Amino acid sequence: MPIPSYNSKTRVQTVSEIPYKQIEINASKRYLMAKRIIDIVFSLLGLIALSPIFFIIAVLIKIEDRQGPVIFKQIRIGKDGKEFIMYKFRSMVSNAEELKETLMEKNEASGPVFKMRNDPRVTKIGKFIRKTSIDELPQLINVLKGEMSLVGPRPAFPEEVKQYSLYEKQRLSVIPGLTCYWQVSGRSNLTFQEWVELDLKYISERSLLIDIRLILRTIVVLFGSKGAY
């Protein structure tokens, strides 16, 4: 079946009428149990081991902009469309959400995603922690709580999901993660459709071996990603 076409300006409203390719999901109980054990063990160890870095980043964020919180909370969409609060180190000025509307016409990303390579809302420390993906580390708390996994599609914003076609909504069929193929394959340099295809590829092929490989690849590219902004 053909994949629904995507227009970044005007989404197709009658997506239920569009044929789409339904993917198969690895939902093996043994795999899911092992995956959850790995998530709990490594997220807990990570939070303990990285606590000194968390403290330093928190201090630097407050020195540059004392107005906002150190940890930024966002509503994201998880498995089966369920909302949850996702945690990140704040990398933008305290009034970033208010300024977003004035920057929408400068969006450089395709699809229902907002990205700017030189976003004026990003602070100096914010540029560093984004480049190195350190801003994502508080999501280890989400992993420990079971709202996220170490590996899985990146969680989407509610306003993005509202624009998804039925084909794209298949991203929501598994628990979202800290890293996935997108995270190690160019990130913001990829189009939205390429992002979706990589996520669906992971969902249909996922296994413990693939998860471990993606975690190791993420560590390798962590400090050298050219697609993070």
Image: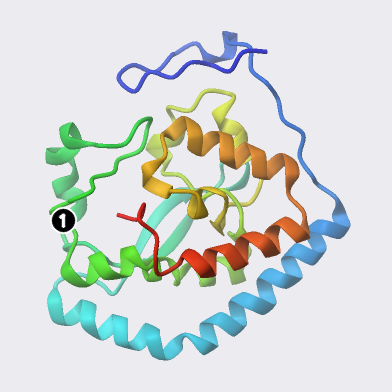
- Find residue 223 and report its image quarter: bottom left
Residue 208 in the image: x percent, y percent? Answer: 77, 60
Q: Residues within 10 Å of mark 1 (few under 14, many from 20)?
A: some
Q: Is residue 160 above or below residue 51?
A: above
- Find residue 11 and report its image quarter: top left
Residue 39 in the image: x percent, y percent? Answer: 67, 69
Residue 164 in the image: x percent, y percent? Answer: 48, 28
Colouring rule applied to residues: rainbow
Q: Residue at x 46, y 44 (%)?
A: 156
**Residue of label 1:** 121
Q: Is residue 97 above or below residue 214?
A: above
In front: 1, or 16?
A: 1
In the rendered view, does 131 fall on the left or right side of 105?
right
Q: Residue at x 17, y 36 (%)?
A: 106
In the rendered view, does 5 fall on the left or right side of 40?
left
Amino acid at the residue labelled 1: Arg
In the rendered view, does 175 fall on the left or right side of 91?
right
In front: 61, or 186?
A: 186
Residue 148 in the image: x percent, y percent? Answer: 58, 59
Secondary structure state at the residue bearing disc 1 = loop
Looking at the rendered image, the quarter that the N terminus falls into is top right
Q: Residue at x 32, y 64 (%)?
A: 131
Does residue 66 appear anywhere in the picture? Answer: no
Does residue 27 appear anywhere in the picture? Answer: yes
In front: 84, or 92?
A: 92
